[in-house]
Amino acid sequence: MSILEQQSLFEIVMGIGNGTDTQEMLQSSLSIMIRRLGCHLGAVVRGNNEEFEVVHSIPNHVKSSPEIMLLCKSALGEHSTTVRPLTLETPEHTLMVFTMPDYGILVLGKVGSAFSKRVTGTLIRIAEKLSIACIACEQTLLIQKEQQHFQMLESRYRFLFSNSPLPVWVI
């Protein structure tokens, strides 16, 4: 692996997981990946073998691409437990699908042939880190929603307590 490849992969790793908003984090992470790897498309798909949704993609029209949908069904089905990425080569480009454990898949598309074995091995680890970052963002959102719910309940309680016509005695 050349020094430029190492530097590019390092920049990708450092760009993953910055922020707690899933969409913003994926926008910055996928942008860095696409730019540094020379790809022309990238997508993160959440789901399992029965149903899935494209959480974020660059460019945006990838969400409705029939190739991507077919690849997602195949990758989230029988290939979801494999470590090696699933590769689909067409005359226009090469699509590579990396498993994101406990989350879904990462799809990268580039013109020409697939990545080298060393770069692919590193991208497998990067997909794992991206999976952890996506799960953390979702858990943060869930915690924020619960905190808002408890604050609303507390304000109701305080309103009822302070506006009660009966005196309250604490002993």
Image: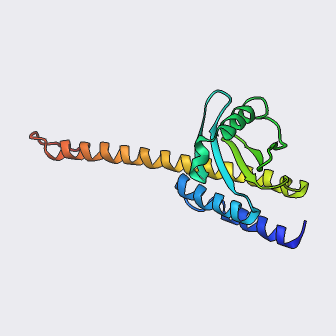
Q: Position of residue 161 (x, y in %)?
A: 19, 43
The residue sitting at 64% across, 47% down in the picture is: 44
**What residue occupies the far top of the structure in this picture?**
50
Determine whether 90 is above or below 37 in the image: above
The residue sitting at 58% across, 48% down in the picture is: 61
Instruction: Assign the N terminus to one quadrant of the image.
Output: bottom right
Q: Where is residue 154 in the image (x, y as percent from the top left)?
A: 30, 45
The residue sitting at 72% across, 63% down in the picture is: 12
**What residue occupies the far front of the structure in this picture?**
91
For residue 13, which quarter of the picture? bottom right
**What residue occupies the far left of the structure in this picture?**
165
Determine whether 108 is above or below 82 in the image: below
Pick the residue in front: 11 or 88: 88
How many numbered discs, if any? 0
On the picture, is 153 further left or further right than 29? Answer: left
Instruction: Assign the C terminus to one quadrant of the image.
Output: top left
Q: Position of residue 20 (x, y in %)?
A: 54, 56
On the picture, is 112 further left or further right than 39? Answer: right
Looking at the picture, the colour scheme in use is rainbow
Q: Where is residue 68 in the image (x, y as percent from the top left)?
A: 68, 41
Determine whether 120 is above or below 66 in the image: below
